[in-house]
Image (cartoon, rainbow, N blue to C red):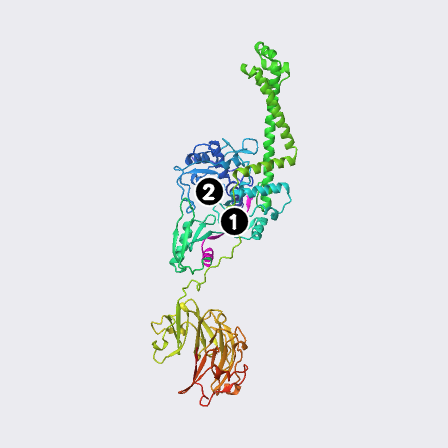
Amino acid sequence: MSEMHDLGNIENQSLAEFTENAYLNYAMYVINDRALPHIGDGLKPVQRRIIYAMSELRLTADAKYMKSARTIGDVIGKYHPHGDSASYEAMVLMAQNFTYRYPLVDGQGNWGSPDDPKSYAAMRYTESKLTQYSKVLLSELGQGTVEWIANFDGTMEEPVVLPARLPNLLLNGGTGIAVGMATDILPHNLNEIVSACVHLLDSPKASVADLMTHIKGPDFPTGAEIISTPAEIQDTYETGRGSVRARAVFAVEAGEIVIEALPYQVSGTKILEQIASQMQAKKLPMVVDLRDESDHENPTRIVIVPRSNRVDLSALMAHLFATTDLERTYRINQNVIQLSGRPGVCSLKELLSQWLTYRQETVLKRLQFRLERILDRLHILEGLMVAFLNIDDVIEIIRTEEKPKQALMTRFELSDRQAEAILDLRLRQLAKLEEIKIKGEQEALAEERKTLEQTIGSKARLRTLIKKELLADAEIFGDARRSEIVARPEAKAFSERDLLTSDPITVVLSQNGWVRAAKGHEVKVEELSYRTGDAYLASAPGKSNQTAVFFDSTGRSYALAAHTLPSARGQGEPLTGRINPPAGSRFTGIILDDLTQKYLIASDAGYGFIGRVEDMVSKNKAGKSYLSVPPGAASLPACEIEDLETQLIAAFTSQGRLLIFPARDLPELGRGKGNKIINIPSGAVKSREEVMAHVLVFSEKDSITVFSGKRFIHLTLKELTHYRGERARRGLKLPRGFQKVDRVELNR
């Protein structure tokens, strides 16, 4: 027989509407009950439940340790019906002194290490209890200070929030990822936070800038340096969003770098792996050894050994800061459950102001709770004093009346509770001494009542009390700042060129454009082998970490990293395999020098200028048009300038004319045609009848040898002075027989 179902109570709802509502409920649950801390005690629900459960187990700082599994069992069985591993991990984090600035749990056993925070032992092996600092959250719990709600199964009660005596939210910070929002709050120094709270109580209109005279910035449990500027930190505090940069602390001992403190939540093992990886990839040729000398006395001690004492240790550390976790940026997003019960991002002032409001409410409830207890006790004491003043009548009533309680209430106008207290008296308490004790207690309670009523009725007295308690806790739990805020230069990674070894090499270029690099500077280029039909053209000594610049006849320049050039053991390789010069051009010269070095750049049309190597460099395979060369003309080999103010330029024409003038007379340009060096008729240049065949840069101590066929002439300073003139002049003819100049040599 088929079953009949009543479908009358089924609600029709679209799938879109149902999923939207379901997801919204889930999101609100995650935000309020899982991921975001409350501004009052700075705890998430799981953390709060762990602390409360441990207090219920009487695991105070003075108690014996208890197995963590026992504690977690209580937590998930009574208050937090979720996974035991997640709850235990939350407990572990509160016990790690490298994670929490002021730990709430005192752990015994393996609770992880800075190198591997998740290497903690299973809960069945570890033991735990609360720290002294946890009293800040728990000491006022049973004094009517906070609201209570039923636990998940309605069999017990738990506090909605703990009555924190200090702003734990800022002291220990916290992270969490909810639905559509997250929180990242960094830890701070207790003394600084308390000082700011006291200032805010005195000056409620204080700005964030005012508060920063007390709070310098975050304070990490592992130390390190905070290198964000005060202005950057202030901007973050004012908006509640931003970031802070922290950097490792190092010292130099006997020429070695010793890293003594790491940024927050950075493991030494990871740093060693990152540096070792660069060493294996040959990106740190200046480092020869890496050691981990960390131990119990020195939790962080990583030693970096440079190759020699010539290594720039500051530059090396700047590179490591830029490429490893030795420098780290921490996001700040001060998103919390506010007093209104809603999540929101708060500025530093809003966090402190709301917490102080919470604290004032908590203290006021505590005082009212105590006042109610005092009034109740005074009421009882008044009844007891009536009994002592009429002791004989009281005894008679108790002995003779069937309902002594009602009789006492009628006879002496007592309340039910007063009469009950009299009946609970023992005979020994009827002594005269007991009467004196009651009078003394009455006087003391009356005085305390007066003080409480004055404090409750005065906002100024209430603020004074809060300040006094804050300072008292700071005296007990406060400590010195661990993360100093310092100004440091920006981290800068080595460029590929910086990472190269600086070995002496000589780059050799052949007439057909084949290039190679030989080790050393004493290379006999005439003894190198060349391909059939090819011959030596030019060479340039330099270093392997420099850039080789090649010029072609059209005035274009090309750049190649010297360390990438083929070895001189063979005949090299053609430059056209790496660069694309114009068709019909030929290579004219090569430069291998520092980027700031100056050179004379000229064309055989008689024009030129002074240029720097850095302006000649081009990353394009097609090079760059550096020297403007007229049609039909060609560029000449570049000449190095050692001293622009004292050196001279010698320009030779193909018709045997020579002009000498100071090098400083030519302009310094980034590119272009340049200025006229020597005057040659334009028609002669176009017809190639006469061109500037050679150009040299020399000093007064040098001499020049001029070759024409088999003839040569040696010109010393005395002879060369005859040819000095102003730039762009025609120049003077060389002696008879040298109307055609084949080549010139500079003798230093």
Q: Which residue is mark 2?
A: 97
Crowding near the residue tagged with mark 2, few <14, some 14–19, many ≥20 C-alpha atoms within 10 Å: some
Q: Amino acid at mark 1?
A: Glu
Which residues, given as a range, are shown in magenta? 315-336
- Residue at the limit of the structure toward the front, as seen here: 718
- Residue at left offset 62%, top offset 13%: 390
The stretch drawn in magenta includes residue 328: yes
Q: Position of residue 323 (x, y in %)?
A: 45, 56
Quarter of the figure with residue 290 = bottom left
| Secondary structure category for the residue under label 2 | loop
Specify whether residue 690 is painted magenta.
Answer: no
Residue 417 in sight from this viewpoint: no
Label 1: few (<14), some (14–19) or many (≥20) C-alpha neighbours in 10 Å: some
588 over 177 or under it: above or below: below
Q: Which residue is more in the foreground, 356 or 252?
A: 252
Q: Which residue is mark 1?
A: 484
